[in-house]
Amino acid sequence: MMILKNFVVFEGGDGSGTSTQLGLLQNRFNFPVSDLPPLYATWEPTDGPIGQLLRSALKGDIPLQRETLATLFAADRNEHVYAPKGIWERSKQGELVISDRYVLSSLVYQGIDCGEALPRRLNDRFPLPELLFFFDIEGERALTRMEERTVKDIYEYLDFQIQVRERYRSLLPGYAQEGVQVEIIDASQSPEAVAEEIWRVLKNLPIVRGA
Ligand code: TYD
């Protein structure tokens, strides 16, 4: 699969802090005097109709077959990437696009749920990011962080999260081999320390350097 320049992805288990970091980056890029490129911060499941359906299913409100879920994640992603003003168009036009979760989430979560073949096949038409951050944290620690959240998703329990971490770690080398810059971040650190690590890498990306 081809690599899409200017496209960056955050991946990790539940409670690994990807959304917090995307928020912190938005603050940095919105700072009025910065000479940074425009940032398009985005996430999956998306806020579109298929993403909303997925969130209801993840809460357990709508019972769906696991293969249906896998198919919906791919359909949501197809809109996310290829619809007008989507990931493809924006990154080609010189915006920095950062997505909280992408293809690897499906290969990991639906891979555990449905086996490897189906999510691979459903996701073989999406471009790869130029840079991928993996937020690495022990399942137990991540779940402790999430205890304050009242509503639990169907995947938010320890046995599953242990498998999630293992599967991420086994799939990352393949991504690096395809030419994706893979950065593993120790996500157990403070949000400030994680933000610093991310910035140290991100600032060297050609679009951010102004190259
Ligand atoms: P998450 O980023 O945790 O959203 P929120 O912070 O709003 O709860 O994502 C929701 C869940 O969706 C998470 O458990 C991972 C799961 N997921 C998949 O199983 N497959 C996918 O392809 C994607 C994008 C997410």
Image (cartoon, helix red, strand yellow):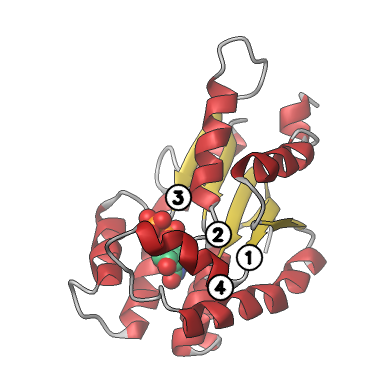
Q: Residue at x 55, y 76 (%)?
A: 108
Whichever of labels 2 and 4 marks the residue nearer the N terminus, that label is 2
Residue 73 in the image: state x and y as whole percent: 39, 67
Q: Furthest-top residue in view?
A: 33
What number of labels is visible?
4
Q: Which residue is mark 1?
A: 137
What is the quadrant of the C terminus in the image?
top right
Give the residue type that dot 4 points to.
Gly
Residue in front for this viewpoint, 71 or 186:
186
Q: Which residue is mark 3?
A: 43
Could you tell me how far apart the alpha carbons at marks 2 and 3 are, in whole angstroms?
Answer: 15 Å
Residue in front for this viewpoint, 28 or 113:
28
Q: Specify few, some or many for label 3: CA neighbours under 10 Å numbering under 14, 14-19, or 20 or more.
A: some
Could you tell me how far apart the alpha carbons at marks 1 and 3 are, in whole angstroms?
Answer: 20 Å
Q: Which residue is mark 2?
A: 16
Residue 202, numbered label: none
Q: Do we see residue 124 in this rendering?
A: no
